[in-house]
Amino acid sequence: MTVGEAGEKEVLARVLGQLSHADAAAVGPGDDCAVMRLAGDLVVTSDMMIEGPDFRLAWHTGFELGHKLAATNLSDVAAMGARPVGLTVSLACPRDTKVVLLEEIARGLDAACRTLAPGCGVVGGDLSTAPVLTAAVTALGDLEGRPAVLRSGAKVGDVVAYAGQLGLAGLGLSLLFAEAADDAGIAQAHAVAGLRASHPEALAAQLTPDPPIVAGPRAARAGATAMMDVSDGLSLDAARLAAASDGTLAFDSVALTAAFGVQGGQAVSVAAMLTGGEDHGLLATFDRAAALPEPFTAIGEVRQRGGGGAAVLLDGVPYEPRGWDPYRVLPPGA
């Protein structure tokens, strides 16, 4: 059955039937607004994914897409040091879209919330039509009485640390373009099964990211001076944190290789770590005297930034930040 055949009421009922209740929601889906009970200040983030630039249905199952929609937004909440408490999800799709696809997306959203951020859930949203499948997600987080950890608090001498996978999602995307797309870049569904068998970790990192959500509040409690989600590539996002803090982030290739050179049996180069996007790990800075909370690993330090100085260094040498830019898309490896 398509959404055009079912109608909005039936589609909504079937989608909502896949979702669990969010613990912090006094009022959930079904009213004009959700009502949330929070212990501290509210953090809010939004993200949009559009079929084509952001995902390919020939590569993703509906469940995987739902998981990724949740994970990418939960990670932003965690990067502020907050506990995720709710998502609103708006989906627009062509009228010939199968209702079961939207049900699968809802199941993926729900499973990601239960696995990555227990107690979080979908608390509202909207349905509409569009030429291609489009999803807009807003995530809500509770700071639980803590101040938010911003990008702007890093100090000279701080340790630069990272938690999560690094570079693996970018390798997964490169594999998909190399072996599951034709010369024009059109996704080929039949080739994905082989990649899932031969490179399961890299494919999973790309299709169903596993960000360390609990590490965000843990870092905040440990005194993180700055933090951000790494979604566009470590070097590019590090440059953003460096600019916000008016400093330079200096990475150590030996530390990067020791911690992330092999992930899930897959060799990952330092270049892939610095430029591959969509890992959704957490980049944070801590006072040098602080004990790093699990699962953070030290990968560098914050240095003073002189006039015209580089935002990012690798082994003391200026490194040109590179990563994902939706307005300047390059083929993987270019």
Image (cartoon, rainbow, N blue to C red):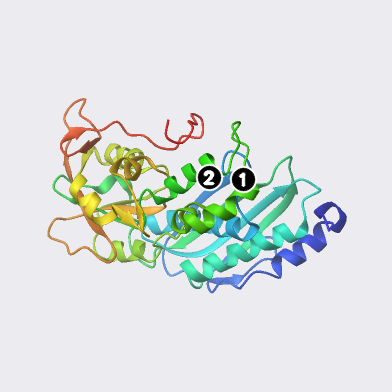
**Label 2 vs label 1, nearer the camera:** 2
Q: Image point 40% across, 37% down: which residue?
A: 323
The secondary structure type at the circle numbered 1 is: loop
Between residues 325 and 271, which one lies in front from this camera angle? 271
Between residues 109 and 30, which one lies in front from this camera angle? 109
The mark total stands at 2
**88 in relation to 19, above or below:** above
Q: In the rendered view, does 287 fall on the left or right side of 197?
A: left
- Circle 1 is placed at which residue position? 56
- How far apart marks 2 and 1 lie (CA) works out to 10 Å
Q: In the rendered view, does 234 fall on the left or right side of 91?
A: left
Q: Quadrant of the C terminus?
A: top left
* Amino acid bearing label 2: Leu
Residue 233, x across and y down, in percent: 38, 42
Can residue 123 be seen in this snapshot? yes
Residue 63, x across and y down, in percent: 62, 61
Between residues 225 and 204, which one lies in front from this camera angle? 204
Residue 238, x across and y down, in percent: 31, 42
Question: Quick check: marks 2 and 1 in contact, CB under 8 Å?
Answer: yes
* First-in-chain label (2 vs 1): 1
- Circle 2 is placed at which residue position? 176
**307 in relation to 185, above or below:** above
* Amino acid bearing label 1: Arg
Between residues 194 and 329, which one lies in front from this camera angle? 194
Quadrant hosting residue 221: bottom left
